[in-house]
Structure formats: structure tokens, C-alpha cells
Amino acid sequence: MKKETEFYRVPNAFWHRIHFVRPRFKSNIENVLLYMANECCRIPDCSSEEYTKRYLNAIRMFPGNIDMSLKTLNNWRTEIPALFSFYEEDKGVGMTRTTSMAKFLHEQQDLTQFLRLFLFSFQFPGGHLKPQDLKDIIYNKIRFKPAQLIIQVLMAGNEILGSMESLKEMSISAEEATYCIFNDIRVTSGVRTPREVAQIILDNRKKKLKYYNKIDPQSLSLTGTARTKGDMIRYAGDILDYMELANLLENHDGYFYMKGNERTTINAFAEDKTFFKGYEYLYGEKSVETAMIAAVEQDWFRYVNDSMNPDLFKTDIESIIKPDDEITVVYDNRIKQVVAMDDTTLKDIGNLGESIICGHEKMRLKICGYEQFVRLVQIVDSPSYHPGFDIDSYEGDGTEDHRYIEVKTTISKRKIQMYGFHMSPNEWRVAGTIKEHYCVYRLMLSEQSKVLFILRNPVQLYKTDMIEAEPRDGMEIMFPVDRFEQTELLTWRN
């Protein structure tokens, strides 16, 4: 007789399904976030009506969205600020402004660090939820930060496995995170410890228990039919995916492990004591009205932006450019030093890009037969001023004409396809002066690819409508990739 499948069940008294905004663009989230951060920074502080109009138009202009319905446009409009706080409304005066979160991503061009900052403040309760959903969270005394709790469970699991002298490392799947963490009030309210959760997960694996797809009002679709297990686990799955993009976790066949070379950052998450307490006074109240909850929303978004510390997390460039990468091996120690740093700043990312492009230029001139110029190529690194470009190179066209290069570098875990960048007032002025001998090298580094585009004489490109440029403390540049040919990134070899 076939043995009946055994399930792990959360008792009804402790069951609450955690959910939050799930962007429709999640499969393309890195490109969308970079694009929308750039577009938000183009919109000045203005009336909420005007901001919404310009914001919706920016969404429509995202590649593939031109025929998007107004309903879907509005879904994008609400999802982006709800999760990522790209803009905030002052409903008292009817004004909307772009937030420091959007400005940070646009200016830093570091998606890994941005997602770490997002995960660091993301919590329940939080203003990313509707008041009615928050009311349920408060009623059930739920208080937790998903990324932090997942890390604490993985740490506790490693301690348990270590005491058993096991060579295995603790991991967690989206299904395990859903049923053993997210949807169990005992865990999300802090009654059950991370170590207890880790032990339960390990015991369930040992017993080969399946996870029960609980059927309750929250798990029914509009037609009254039960949602699939995929629907049930997608929220925990989203957080795990965000944590992977933030280089906190790595995914092996659906099981997520802590990133081994990110211990400092992971410890910062595990030991974090910060928490938005704007809803705290509502806990224990006999009657909580949604209007009371809604009144806290603006404070929440202010907290997310004001508490953002750009120096808190630095991207580990070694996760993008490996120590044994050809670029690292054959070029100078400057790249190796930047790659090895565990407290990378924006300047370090810029230094990395400059060093790679310096090597590219030397190899370009060598291949073209102008080796007499190779040793003259240099990074312009003055502590007292910025000449408006990063590298002094040569055209390599039979003349002794210089080529002045400004390098714009973006790093991300996955390949991105948003190519915009910012030019300072000085860079734009110098570009207009030098004209055809001024080039912007747009360099995008990811685990999957190293992409380079060269824009010669950007001011003229703007005047001839080859690129878009909008004034904002300099110029915000966007260029359609189909008008420019990707340049092969060369590696310097002596």
C-alpha cells in the first residue's frame, strides 16, 4: 500500500500570509530601476498632477511599453515608489518630488549597493503596504525584516550543522522560507527564534516532509479557486531573488546560500537594530482605523530616504571582475587593488573603469601601429581639479592629435541595457570646447559581459538629435543603442 504523503503544516492560529507589491517588471528589474531612477531625476519638484503626467510618459517610453494600457501604466506608477521610494508626495500641499533613493541610484550607477540599501530598510510593517493589509500585520503583532531574518536563519543553520561536524552549509528554498518564516506568525512576531526555524527546516528535510499548500481566504483567487504553490511562495522568492542581486546570497538549483566573500555586509544585516517605529503606538490598540495607519505613510517614506546611508554598503567588485579575469591578470596593479577592496566607493568604481579603458586605449594604439604613443596614454588624476575628462590618449590616425576620454562606468550583477549617464557642467563645457577630440566611453560591467560604447563629440551628437540631453546640474544623457555600434573592449598586453 502506497504511503500517504506527510506534510508540514502551520497551525491555523499562527497562519498569516505575508505579501507585498510584486512589480510586473521583476524579470527585468535592473534595467527598469536604472531607467526610472534616471527619468525621475529629470522631473523637478512640481505639482502631483504634473509629476504623474511626466512619470507616466517616462514609463511609456521604456522599451516595449509604447502600447501599454493606462491601467498597466498606473500599476507601474504605484509599484515603483511603493517598493523603492523613488518619489514622495506631500499630500498637504499637493506637491511631489524625486527622493534621495532615486538620486542615489542614478548618480552612483551601482545596483548592488542600491538593492542592499533597499533590503536593509524593508520591513513589516511598512508603508509599502495598503492600510488594510497593515491593519492585519499590526493585529497579528508582526514585526520583522525579511532579509535580516533569512540571514539569521542561515547563520543559525550553519551553527547547527557545524556542531554536527557536517561539511554541508545551510541553505533555504523559497518554499521553506514561505512556510517556515514568512507565513508563520510565531516567526514574524519574534516568538520563534532563527535557530528554532533553522532546526525545523533541517528536521523537515530529514523527514522528507512536503509543504502543505494551505487553502484559506487569502489563498483563493477571484474565481474562488485555490492558488498554485507558485503563487504562495512568490513573495519569499522575490526577497531571495533581491538578496541574490544584492550579492548577499547565491542560488544553487533553487537553494540559497550566504555569499562567502560578503561576511562583513552579511553581519551588518544580522546585527542591525534599526527599525521604523511609526506604527508602534498602534500595537495593542483595541480598535485601529485605516485612517490612523494611512497617516503614517509619509513618515515611512521619509524614514526610508533619510536613513539611507550610502557609505553603509560597498559593492564587492571582485564579484563582477574576478581575480583571475583576463582584464585583471594582464593589466596593472591598480585594477587588482580595486577588485580586492571590500569597502568600495563610487570613486573606486570610477578608478576601475578608468584603468580598464586606459588599457583598452594602449592596446588600440598598439594594434593600429602607433606604439610610440602607448607609453604616453595616461589617467589624469589631479587632487585639486578635474579637467573635464579622465584619460589623455591619442587618436592613432597618423596625426599627433590627442583623444580626451571621459569614462562612465556602471556595475551590476546581471547585464543591463540602460545606457544613460550624467555629465557634470564642467565635463559638458569641456566637451563643447574640444569637440571631435572629446569622447565619452560608456562602460558597463557585469558577471555576464563587459560592454563598451564610444560617443564622440557628445555636444554635437545632441545638436544633431543623435542623443538626448536634458539639463540637471550638468546634462542627463540618454542614447539609443541602435544608433551606436558596440566597441570591442581590448585588454592591454605588453
Image (spheres, rainbow, N blue to C red):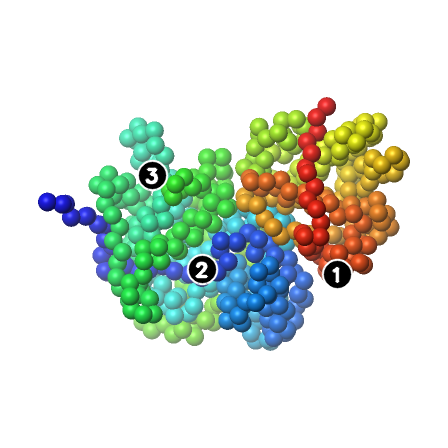
Of pointers 3 and 1, the one earlier in the residue sequence? 3
**Quadrant housing the C terminus:** top right
Q: Residue at x 54, y 45 (%)?
A: 414
- For disc 3, the marked residue is 157
The residue tagged with tag 2: helix, strand or loop?
loop
Q: Residue at x 83, y 38 (%)?
A: 395
**Quadrant housing the N terminus:** top left
The residue tagged with tag 3: helix, strand or loop?
helix
Badge 3 crowding class, 10 Å Cα cut-off, few under 14, some 14 to 19, many 20 or more, is many
Q: Which mark is residue 471?
A: 1
Q: Residue at x 81, y 36 (%)?
A: 393
Where residue 448 appears, as percent x and y from the top left, is 56, 40
Where residue 59 appears, as percent x and y from the top left, is 59, 64
- For disc 2, the marked residue is 22
| In the displayed structure image, the side of residue 249 where residue 137 appears, left or right | left
Q: Residue extending furthest right?
A: 399
Q: Nearer the viewer, residue 134 or 217?
A: 217
Taking 225 as reference, is 49 above or below it?
below
| In the displayed structure image, the side of residue 464 where residue 357 appears, left or right | left
| Amino acid of disc 1 | Pro
Q: Nearer the viewer, mark 3 or mark 1?
A: 1
Badge 2 crowding class, 10 Å Cα cut-off, few under 14, some 14 to 19, many 20 or more, is some
Image quarter of residue 368: top right
Q: Residue at x 23, y 42 (%)?
A: 208
Badge 1 crowding class, 10 Å Cα cut-off, few under 14, some 14 to 19, many 20 or more, is few
| Amino acid of disc 3 | Gly
Q: Nearer the viewer, residue 151 or 17?
A: 17
